[in-house]
Image (cartoon, rainbow, N blue to C red):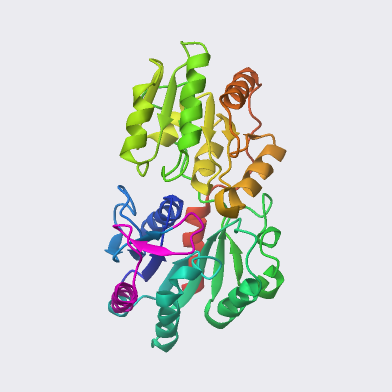
Amino acid sequence: MTAPRIFFYVQHLLGIGHIARASRIANALVKDGFEVTVVTGGLPVPGFPGDGVKTIELPPVVASNVGFSGLADADGQAAGEEFLSRRRDLLLKAFEEAKPEVVIIEAFPFGRRQMRFELLPLLDAIEKANPRPKLLSSVRDILQENRKPGRDEETVKLVRDHFDAVLIHGDPDFVRLEDTFPLTADIADRLRYTGLVAPPPAPEPSETFDIIASAGGGAVGLELIRAARDAAALLPADIRWLLVTGPNLPAADFSALSEDAPANVTLVRFRKDFPSLLRGAKVSISQAGYNTVGDLLRTQCRSILIPFVAAGETEQTVRAERLQALGLAEILPEKGLTLDDVKAAVERALAAPPRPAVRLDLDGAAKSAAIIRSMIG
């Protein structure tokens, strides 16, 4: 028998969280015996999607502003109609050549509305295909709130008209889709909770740091890293710090951070062994993105979370507040973050008792593969 073919579309616009989560799912699908083609539409990210996964790279687009309302090409120029039409045609051609049994679209129709120029034609092509592949939406557990009037109704119509299932990558005992999507009842028959897509437990670290501050992809989070660097200078010099800026931090900012770093601070853009390093750390300072929190939940590390809130973003705040309520994190505000805030939070975390055990389902990648396997018989 030939392996069932999966066509997995993922578009990251700012950070690397979407491509990282999709890659973990893609890798689990390969392990389960699927043939997986991941179509990416953002800037290349080293290490993703991963071994054993066929990758098709569309001409990349990025968010042209923090509010995600516009698209730009890799050079930062506004993406014009000719550019976008070429992308659409390449996507449709890739779909036709792949002849998949299952199509997964990451985030859409709950997000990524700015990609409708190519995703709506893809939905039409799926409906016309013979045999028609199963179509799934792959979404994180917490959606962005403050959507414009009519958006939720539009999402419901697209789900009901086109999608066979919605994979919600979360634990319903932690947060449910209806907590951030008010029309959940209208699509309840399509929903499948997978658990959180966390990494497997990490191996023992090759070196240890007491405190790790990280900024995800690095497109945002400079102030977090700067505050951590400055706090290190005010705390005992025998505390070892690792600051992970992310690969997308501008080179000038990275250089400026390096110039004044204390001797007990190691500054890097990326560490492939980041989950292992967290396992050996006492305290983590980070934003509250989906993947970073997944890494943290696999460890006993005390967490200081600084949720990303620019342009009205609400998702990280919801996640951080749920974790704080479970005694798994302390929250600091992104707006007005001060050196004293970080220093005091680190001192509290170092003095705190062991963190309570995590009782959340973290096996979302493998369970996603099992759900898809059950759907195709």
Q: What residue is at 44 percent from the left and 64 percent from the top?
A: 70
Query: How far across and down, in percent of the image, does residue 311 sit?
Result: 56, 53
Image: magenta residue range: 65-94
Residue 18 is covered by the magenta coloring: no
Query: How far across and down, in percent of the image, does residue 105 sit?
Result: 45, 68
Q: Is residue 215 above or below residue 147?
A: above
Q: How many marks?
A: 0
Image position of 168 (left or right of 267): right
Query: Is the N terminus in the top left, top right, bottom left or bottom right quadrant?
Result: bottom left
Image position of 147 (left or right of 14): right
Residue closer to the observer: 22 or 85: 85
**Residue 204 in view, yes or no:** no
Q: Quadrant of residue 324?
A: top right
Query: How far across and down, in percent of the image, does residue 236 sit?
Result: 51, 11
**Residue 145 in view, yes or no:** yes
Query: How far across and down, in percent of the image, does residue 34 sit?
Result: 36, 64
Q: Is residue 93 above or below residue 343?
A: below
Residue 89 is covered by the magenta coloring: yes
Q: What residue is at 52 percent from the left and 53 percent from the top?
A: 364
Q: Quadrant of residue 96?
A: bottom left
Q: Is residue 10 above or below residue 325?
A: below
Image position of 375 (left or right of 6): right
Q: What residue is at 29 percent from the left and 62 percent from the top?
A: 55
Residue closer to the observer: 192 or 4: 192
